């Protein structure tokens, strides 16, 4: 079956004309997609022959909301989306003073197996198409009745393990034929698939890049992030420096503070020396214990001491405020609970 919602106008035109339909039909079909048509039968101004062809040959990707959990302490909403084949992914809608931001998933599950991550612990099923990433945003927009202005690919999955679809998504969602969300309003987060960081840098998109670092040396990083055995810290930092040189863009490093694991003064000093002189920002996140691995958040005092050491070395760092903490608004948790039948 052909995923026509992942196509741009040129591709859709080629697809329809190759199958004997008029060129202008592509614009009509795109218009229906833009108006959230959920079936080909909704497309009333296209001939029945074309509708029948599409019904037989193509499908309209979706991300239907099956559960929305509203935080009682802030405006955060956590969504569970159902995809056309019955798989589930999740997304989190957040409200900031500058507008609505959605965190979307790029894969059903993840192969990377980070020990602190609920998604990583629940295995991998498949990658998402570009249209399924767009559909998560659009479903949330229709639900909250507001335009979503910012997108982060920080939900389930490793975006750079689904590189081609993610790049297609970025091009699609930023186009006028789709949601017209500018690339500079989108951030991609990776656990550090080094070759793809080089590829991404070479594309020179306006999109932001986050790297999940979580430890300043190979020994500690390999303990929690198996990907580090394949792409160790030195190689990752080389790629990060290449990215900054090539794009002149600042990188954000994500660092989840885990009590007694990666939060000592020495860890902070090592991290500072790793990042010294690099155009970057460090996001310190108190870890969420979701995997049963017994991880505990660092104390608030430790979080700030860690940040102060980084700042003392001239490395930009902030302790991130956690939104939606009452609704499990963190990577992989809602789906995990849902499939266990708890919610
Ligand atoms: N796979 C990508 C993007 C999805 S994960 C990546 O790893 O970057 C989004 C972010 O949530 C990553 O920075 C990830 O390391 C972080 N994360 C995962 N589990 C977490 C937890 N239990 N506590 C805090 N942050 C977590
Ligand atoms: Fe995958 Fe990211 Fe979770 Fe690691 S943190 S398992 S890369 S989703």
Image: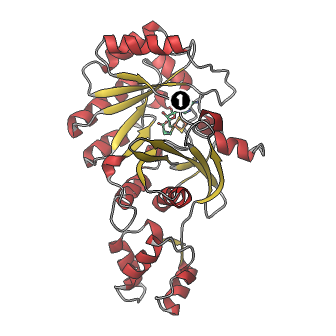
Q: Which residue sits at x=43%, y=79%?
A: 29
Label 1, on which residue?
A: 226
In the image: residue 10, left or right of residue 35: left
Residue 273, x across and y down, in percent: 32, 14
Q: Is residue 178 above or below residue 66?
A: below
State the image quarter where residue 109 is shown.
Answer: top right
Residue at 78 percent across and 46 percent down: it is 341
Kindly give the residue lying farthest to the right in the view shown. Answer: 341
Q: Position of residue 18 (x, y in %)?
A: 39, 83
Task: State whether residue 85 is above or below residue 187.
Answer: below
179 sits left or right of 139 in the view: left
Task: Let me know if residue 263 appears in the view.
Answer: no
Q: Residue at x 52, y 74 (%)?
A: 37
Q: Nearer the viewer, residue 145 or 201?
A: 145
SS of the residue under disc 1: loop
Task: Indicate left or right for 13 with 298 as reference.
Answer: left
Position of residue 292 in the picture relative to residue 191 (left or right): right
């Amino acid at each position: 079956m052909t995923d026509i919602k992942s196509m741009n106008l040129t591709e859709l035109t080629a697809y329809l004309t190759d199958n004997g339909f008029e060129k202008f039909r592509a614009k009509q079909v795109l218009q229906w997609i833009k108006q959230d048509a959920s079936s080909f039968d909704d497309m009333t101004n296209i001939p029945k022959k074309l509708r029948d062809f599409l019904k037989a040959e193509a499908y309209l990707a979706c991300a239907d909301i099956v559960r929305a959990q509203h935080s009682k302490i802030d405006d955060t909403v956590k969504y569970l989306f159902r995809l056309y084949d019955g798989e589930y992914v999740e997304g989190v809608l957040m409200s900031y003073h500058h507008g609505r931001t959605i965190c979307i998933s790029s894969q059903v599950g993840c192969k990377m197996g980070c020990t602190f991550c609920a998604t990583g612990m629940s295995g991998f099923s498949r990658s998402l198409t570009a249209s399924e990433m767009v559909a998560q945003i659009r479903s949330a927009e229709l639900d909250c009745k507001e335009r979503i202005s910012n997108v982060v690919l920080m939900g389930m999955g490793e975006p750079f393990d689904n590189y081609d679809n993610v790049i297609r998504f970025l091009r699609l969602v930023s186009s006028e034929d789709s949601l017209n969300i500018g690339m500079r309003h989108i951030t991609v987060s990776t656990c550090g698939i080094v070759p793809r960081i080089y590829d991404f840098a070479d594309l020179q998109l306006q999109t932001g890049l986050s790297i999940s670092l979580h430890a300043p040396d190979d020994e500690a990083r390999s303990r929690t992030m198996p990907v580090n055995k394949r792409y160790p810290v030195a190689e990752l930092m080389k790629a990060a420096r290449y990215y900054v040189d090539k794009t002149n863009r600042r990188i954000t490093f994500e660092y989840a503070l885990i009590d007694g694991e990666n939060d000592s003064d020495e860890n902070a000093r090592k991290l500072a020396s790793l990042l010294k002189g690099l155009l970057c920002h460090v996001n310190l996140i108190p870890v969420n214990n979701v995997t049963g691995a017994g991880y505990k958040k660092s104390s608030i005092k430790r979080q700030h001491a860690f940040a102060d050491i980084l700042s003392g070395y001239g490395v930009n760092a902030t302790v991130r405020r956690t939104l939606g903490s009452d609704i499990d608004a963190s990577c992989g948790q809602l789906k995990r609970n849902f499939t266990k039948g708890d919610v």
